[in-house]
Image (spheres, rainbow, N blue to C red):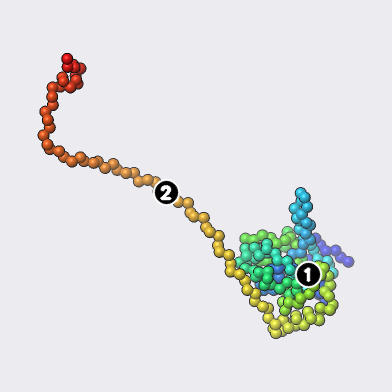
Amino acid sequence: MSSIPLAGAYRYTRKGMGVFHLPLSRPWTWALTHHGMWSVFVHDVEPARPGVPERRHPLHPPEAVLGCWLALYATREYDEEAVEWLRGAHGLESPTRDVLPAGAYVAMARLAEVSTVGNDSRAFGRDAWWWPPGASCRGTVAWWLEEVQVFEPLVAAPAQRLAPMDPELLPELRERVRLARDGIWRPEVYATPAPPPPAPREPEPRVLAPPVPTVPVRRELPADDSPVAPMGSVEQLGLFGGGGT
């Protein structure tokens, strides 16, 4: 058995017929079923412990799954970070957690290709669903999907990631895929909330104009033409040093 390369892009060489369970949190499922998302990012999460924050480890799929079908399962988890990412990257307002299907299969897709962020031209070109301008990168290992078929949600119990799908569910799954493919069933349009109001803009700082210099206004006193009393003896006023005796 050949090993999976750990760098660069690699694509399936044969079309497998197996169907494998792949859980996906909401609203990522909605982005895939209603807005053409064609990539998924699968991680193992190492819980936080004293002195060490939570860490996410990106995963490559097993070689046996490449080229096979993935039954995409909407979990009950609702990813608030995904809500923010979809809003910032695509201007999409996600339906709320109580609107989107949960605990159900919602789509089928073929796992066609796997690539890493450092070795794939789509990452360098800022792929719309991987690393669009103005948004963060969703992960370092992308699983690319083809032949995506959305169908009427099929409620089922959770399962282990990439476990073969329950054989008892396969007939119903195939029937729902056929009805959707033939246009007999069409995806439901889920109500979305109104976009949040834009953040208030800080007022522009007021630039005060320099003060206009004022021209002093000369105040004219009213004229008084009345006669002035004659001045007394200068010596008596003591103005020239000779005070009176």
Q: Position of residue 11 (x, y in %)?
A: 78, 68
- Res 141 visible: yes
Look at mark 1 in the image and give the residue it sits on. 22
Residue lying furthest right: 1
Q: Earlier in the sequence, mark 1 or mark 2?
A: 1
Residue at horizontal 75%, vertical 80%? 177
Residue lying furthest top: 245
Residue at horizontal 75%, vertical 53%? 53
Between 160 and 34, which is closer to the camera in this rendering?
160
Up the image or down, 73 lies above or below 181; here it is above
Between 79 and 87, which is closer to the camera in this rendering?
79
Residue flagged by tag 1: what amino acid is it?
A: Leu
**Dot 1 and dot 2 residues touching (CB under 8 Å):** no
Q: Quadrant of residue 129?
A: bottom right
Q: Quadrant of the C terminus?
A: top left
Residue at horizontal 68%, vertical 81%? 186
Q: Quadrant of residue 14?
A: bottom right
Residue flagged by tag 2: what amino acid is it?
A: Leu
Q: Position of residue 12 (x, y in %)?
A: 80, 70
Q: How many marks?
A: 2
Up the image or down, 173 lies above or below 84; here it is below
Look at mark 2 in the image and give the residue it sits on. 208
Q: Position of residue 144 (x, y in %)?
A: 74, 68
Label 2 element class:
loop
Between 134 and 244, which is closer to the camera in this rendering?
244
- Res 147 visible: no
Q: Quadrant of residue 221?
A: top left
Q: Position of residue 101 (x, y in %)?
A: 71, 73
Instruction: Report whether 235 appears left or right of 194.
Output: left
Label 1 element class:
strand
